[in-house]
Image: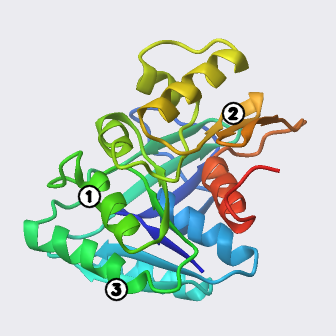
Amino acid sequence: MILTVTPNPSLDRTYEVPSLDRGEVVRATGERMDPGGKGVNVSRAVAAAGRRTVAVLPLGGAPGALVAELLHGQGIEVAPVPVAGATRSNIALAEADGVLTKINAPGPELSPEEQELLLETVRGQSAGTDWIACCGSLPRGLAPSWYAELVARAHTAGVRIALDTSGPALLAALRERPDVVKPNAEELAEAVGRPLATVGDALKAAEELRGLGARAVLASLGADGQLLVDDAGSWYGSARVDAVRSNVGAGDASLAGFLIAGGRGP
């Protein structure tokens, strides 16, 4: 079983529009609603593969109730953490030419009590778990060290943990030696403080993150493919895509596949 943790989930509304004209009334030609957040995306991919997954996430207000309902409809078990603030609602405008404009709300601020309840819910759900996947940005109220605390508690319970976040939260968590971190190319460059022009540059950066504490680095490099660096060695793979329909959730799906496969190289 794969347990996912999404500290800042969302209700994602996508509107299809012919074009986006500022200052004009734009009539949508289609719309949809999805449960959102990086950990949620991982759970959705795991469930689509026929594996059991439980999603731990703080939920509040009508948007939070709808997120839980949508997840249940996809066969995903939900371990909700009730919070006073309403779950954020994000908006995406998809134009006919493939351009996607996203407006992401900040989300609620979690109180100290809600933060601790989130950690305790993860602990309570972790028995028999193969992996805990902690994904996404931190909501207001959570310090960058929050993920580090979660990694430390997971290891104390003897559970492997994957971390997909960026910036100070990623760097703070490395000291607790997460079993795998999954940055994209931009997040990997940010972590080492320099641009990465080649796959070789990405390999060196991944090795630096391992030197800072990551036991394995699974880096998604967009059109350039994906890179895995762990104790057993380094692997690189790519696949040609003739027509890109969307890159939303691609990295989350790749993390889900990696965890389903056992979280190791070939």
The image shows residue 156 at horizontal and vertical percentages of 35, 69
- Between the C-alphas of marks 1 and 2, the distance is 30 Å
The numbered mark, 1 or 3, whose residue comes first in the sequence reads: 3
> Quadrant where the N terminus lies?
bottom right
Amino acid at circle 2: Gly
Determine the residue positioned at 90% across, 36% down: 242
Determine the residue positioned at 87% across, 38% down: 239
The numbered mark, 1 or 2, whose residue comes first in the sequence reads: 1
The image shows residue 168 at horizontal and vertical percentages of 29, 36
* Element type at mark 3: helix
Q: Please say if 232 is above or below 77.
A: above
The image shows residue 219 at horizontal and vertical percentages of 62, 37
The image shows residue 22 at horizontal and vertical percentages of 43, 32
Task: Pick the residue in front: 186 or 86.
Answer: 186
Amino acid at circle 3: Gly
Q: Is residue 153 left or right of residue 164?
A: left
Q: Which label was assigned to residue 222?
A: 2
* Element type at mark 2: helix
- Between the C-alphas of marks 1 and 3, the distance is 15 Å
Can residue 188 be seen here?
Answer: yes
Amino acid at circle 1: Glu
- Between the C-alphas of marks 3 and 2, the distance is 35 Å
Contact flag, marks 1 and 2 (Cβ < 8 Å): no
Q: Which label was assigned to residue 124?
A: 3
In the figure, residue 152 lies in which quadrant? bottom left
Determine the residue positioned at 71% across, 55% down: 264
Task: Pick the residue in front: 47 or 163.
Answer: 163
Q: Which residue is mark 1?
A: 149
